């Protein structure tokens, strides 16, 4: 392993956090990553509004805050293909969002946009897959024209919990603008082991969400500090580092906020504690090698 960076992690590994997990407001989001010494955010919502839906004045204000603080943007977590947009819904919503984000990502200095692959909306498997792939192909072509990279997350959608489908998406569409985002903790919530999936999709992973969870005796999923749950976080991080992963590790604690349920709000103290726990875990992994 290479020597630790100023952030206490190996050179080439960059740490960030999904900002609204720390605070609804951007100032609080910036303050949380600054306290960690990371100065890097993944943007999802500001004041409860997704980045693509901010009016122009609010967006420009956000850009000013980021620039003043010296905080960079690792990527934007979009709503394209997510749990709120089934494959039976209006595709124009996604195309419009991509157009807006293409302009805004250029201003923010990032190329990465998180997407998913559409809930079924009641379609049967073959039609669901056909429609999801057709939409993602069109999105990837447009993203390529804009110089963006769409990072498909293992979450909601046709390919959300299937490594073979994720690989088929990337290789079948064949665009450099479509790659994968691996969320370490999503497997616990969706019922599959994280590490085997990561082994399969690793060559295509360009972004990672760090999350951990455990299933209680009542079957309920509880999100916990990284390395203390059932998501094999340490093993996944070890695999990523061993294979030279050079992308961002972005924390998504879900300790105080559950955006997919529309509940909770960011907690800066919990966010910072989560970041410290991740740094400590990476340090332990490094010391064991």
Image: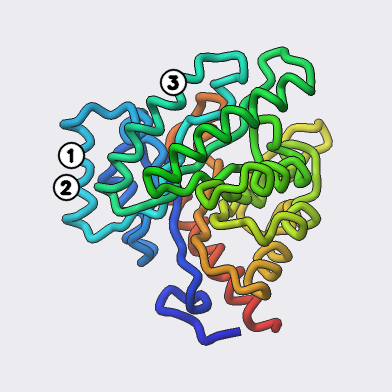
Q: Between 85 and 148, which is closer to the camera in this rendering?
A: 148
Give how far across and how far down residue 6 sits, in percent.
Answer: 40, 78
**How many dots with numbers?**
3
Q: Which residue is mark 1?
A: 60
**Placement of the N terminus among the 4 image quadrants:** bottom right
Q: Residue at x 30, y 54 (%)?
A: 109
Relative to 116, is 213 above or below? below
Q: What residue is shown with label 3?
A: 93
Q: Quadrant of the C terminus?
A: bottom right
User: Residue visible at 40% across and 33% down?
Assistant: 98
Residue at horizontal 49 percent and vertical 39 percent from the top: 141
* First-in-chain label (3 vs 2): 2
Q: Nearer the viewer, residue 29 or 10?
A: 10
Pick out the residue farthest to the bottom. 3
Residue 214: where, in percent of width, then height?
A: 74, 45
Q: Residue at x 74, y 40 (%)?
A: 165
Picture quadrant where residue 131 is located: top right
Q: Residues within 10 Å of mark 3 (few under 14, many from 20)?
A: few
> Colour scheme in the image?
rainbow
Q: Label 2 crowding class (10 Å Cα cut-off): few <14, some 14-19, many 20+?
A: few
Q: Secondary structure at mark 3?
A: helix
Give the distance between the C-alpha atoms of the residues marked 1 and 2, in whole angstroms: 6 Å
> What SS does tag 2 mark?
helix
Front residue of 235/151: it is 151
Q: CA distance from mark 3 to mark 2?
A: 27 Å
Contact? badges 1 and 2 (CB < 8 Å): yes
Mark nearest the camera among 3 and 1 is 3
Whether residue 11 is visible to the viewer of this picture, yes or no, is yes
N-terminal-most mark, 3 or 1? 1
Q: Which residue is mark 2?
A: 64
* Element class at badge 1: helix
């Amino acid at each position: 392993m290479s020597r630790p960076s100023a952030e206490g992690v190996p050179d080439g590994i960059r740490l960030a956090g999904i900002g609204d997990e720390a605070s609804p407001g951007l100032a609080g989001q910036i303050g949380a990553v600054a306290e960690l010494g990371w100065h890097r955010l993944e943007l999802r919502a500001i004041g409860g509004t997704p980045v693509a839906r901010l009016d122009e004045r609010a967006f420009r204000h956000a850009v000013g805050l980021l620039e003043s603080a010296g905080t960079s943007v690792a990527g934007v977590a979009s709503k394209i293909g997510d749990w709120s947009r089934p494959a039976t819904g209006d595709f124009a919503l996604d195309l419009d969002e991509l157009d807006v984000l293409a302009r805004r990502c250029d201003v923010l200095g990032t190329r990465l946009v998180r997407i998913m692959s559409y809930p079924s909306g009641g379609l049967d498997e073959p039609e669901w897959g056909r429609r999801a792939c057709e939409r993602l192909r069109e999105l990837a072509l447009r993203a390529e024209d804009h110089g963006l990279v769409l990072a498909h997350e293992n979450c909601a959608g046709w390919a959300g919990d299937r490594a073979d489908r994720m690989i088929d998406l990337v290789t079948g569409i064949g665009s450099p603008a479509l790659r994968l985002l691996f969320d370490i903790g999503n497997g616990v919530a969706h019922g599959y082991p994280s590490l085997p999936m990561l082994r399969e999709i690793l060559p295509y992973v360009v972004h990672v969400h760090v999350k951990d969870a455990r299933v209680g005796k009542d079957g309920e999923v509880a999100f916990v500090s990284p390395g203390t749950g059932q998501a094999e976080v340490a093993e996944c991080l070890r695999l990523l580092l061993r294979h030279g992963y050079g992308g961002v590790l972005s924390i998504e604690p879900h300790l105080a906020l559950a955006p997919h349920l529309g509940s909770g709000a960011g907690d800066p103290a919990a966010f910072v504690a989560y970041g410290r726990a991740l740094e400590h875990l990476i340090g332990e992994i490094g010391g064991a090698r």
